[in-house]
Image (spheres, grey):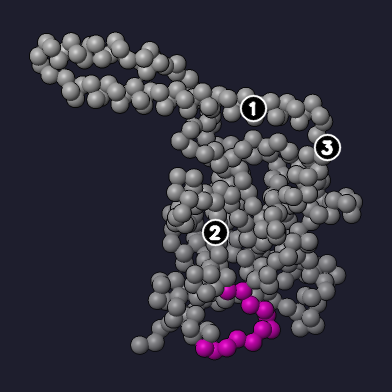
Amino acid sequence: MPSAASVTPDLPIPISRVTNRYLLFDITTVSWLRREHHVIGVLIGSMPQAPQQNVFMGLPLELMPEEVCLLVDKGVAYVVDDAKVHANGIRDLQKADRESYARALEQRGREYSKLFTSRKEESRDKAIRKKAVSNNTKSSESSTSVTDFAISTPQTFISSPKLSPLPGYSLSLTPTTSHPLISPTPPTFPPSSPAQDSASASLIPVPPSYPLYAHLHSKSYFMAPGLRFGCHYLVYPGDPLRFHSHFLGTGVGWDEELDLMDIVGGGRLGTGVKKGFLIGGEVVEEDGTREEGLERDKGDGQSRDKTKGTTGQVRCFSIEWAAM
C-alpha cells in the first residue's frame, strides 16, 4: 500500500470552512501540501489515546487565511461551506443509499462487537492459564490438579473464535480519516459564473500582512503562526521538522507609522531567541493606486496593477539588536 508521502490527492482540494475556520481532514492532502506547497498549518485535533494533553495533536489541520488564499489563487484548492454541503448531500441522498449506509454501519458494529468479545475471552483464558502455571509444582499430584483444572475449564475459555480486524482499521487506534460519505463537486477555474465565484480567493478575508506572506512564500520559505513571539509569522528556511525559524516576520503597511520602541523591542526579542526581526510591506505608488487598481498576489510575491499593468514590489528589512 503506498504511503501518504507518495500519493497525490485529487485536485483541486476541498478545504472545509467550519465556523470561519479552514480545516483539512485527510492525511494524504496534508502531507502533499506540506511537501509540494510549503503549507504546514496547525494540527488542532486531540489524540484518542491522550485526550487531555495538548502537546501532541492530530487531525484536523487548521490553515491560516493566508494559506487558504494562496492555494485558491493557484487553483490548487477551493473552499466549501462544510455545514451547507453536508446538509445538501444528506438531503439529496436517495432512500436506497441511506438504507445501504445504515446497514453498513450496523454490520460494522456487529463485527467489532464480535471482535471485542473474542479478545475479552482470550484475555480471561490467558489469565486463567497464568494462574494455573503459577500454582504448578514439580510433584505429580500438582501436575494432575492442573490438568484437571484445564479439563474442567469451559470450552469457550480454551478455544475461542478468532476474528481478524477489519481491513485498514485497528481497535487500538481511532482512524483519523473517514471515508467520505459526501464529496463536494469542485468548481471550475477560473470561475465562469457568479454562482462559482465562491471559489475565488477575493472572498477570503486575509489580514494586511498577506503581501509579506506571499512574498516570503515565493522565496520557498515555510511559515507558521508567530503568536508565541508576538509577530505574524515564524519564518523557516525549510521544513520546521528540520530547521529552526530564522526570522520573526511582521507585516506592516507602506505608509504605516512605526513606534521606535516597537522596532527596538522586536530587534531585541529576535536577537534574544537567535532570530532576526523582519518587517515588510507592499510598495505603494505615490499616487495611491494600490488601493484601487492592484490585484491580489498570485503566489509569486508580487501584486499586479490591473489599470496600469505595473507590478508592486514587497520590501523587507531585517533588524537585529547590536548594542552592548
Q: Residues within 10 Å of mark 2 (few under 14, many from 20)?
A: many
Q: On the image, which quarter does residue 317 sit in? A: bottom right
Mark carried by residue 92: 3
Q: Nearer the viewer, mark 3 or mark 2?
A: 3
**Count of marks placed on residues:** 3
Q: Residues within 10 Å of mark 3 (few under 14, many from 20)?
A: few
Distance from disc 1 to disc 2, alpha carbons, whole Å, reads 45 Å
Q: Earlier in the sequence, mark 3 or mark 1?
A: 3
Q: Earlier in the sequence, mark 1 or mark 2?
A: 1
Residue drawn at point x = 55 percent, y = 55 percent? 44
Q: Do the residues bearing badges 3 and 1 touch, measured as CB atoms within 8 Å? A: no
Residue highlighted by disc 1: 106
The boundaries of the magenta stretch are 250-261
Residue drawn at point x = 51 percent, y = 23 percent? 114
Task: Evaluate whether residue 249 shows in this view.
Answer: no
Magenta stretch: dominant SS?
loop
Residue drawn at point x = 50 percent, y = 62 percent? 236
Amino acid type, label 1: Glu
Q: Nearer the viewer, mark 1 or mark 2?
A: 1
Amino acid type, label 3: Asp
Distance from disc 3 to disc 1, alpha carbons, whole Å, reads 22 Å
Residue highlighted by disc 2: 222
**Residue 4 horizontal/vertical position (percent):** 54, 38
Residue 228's place in the image compared with 48, above or below, is: below
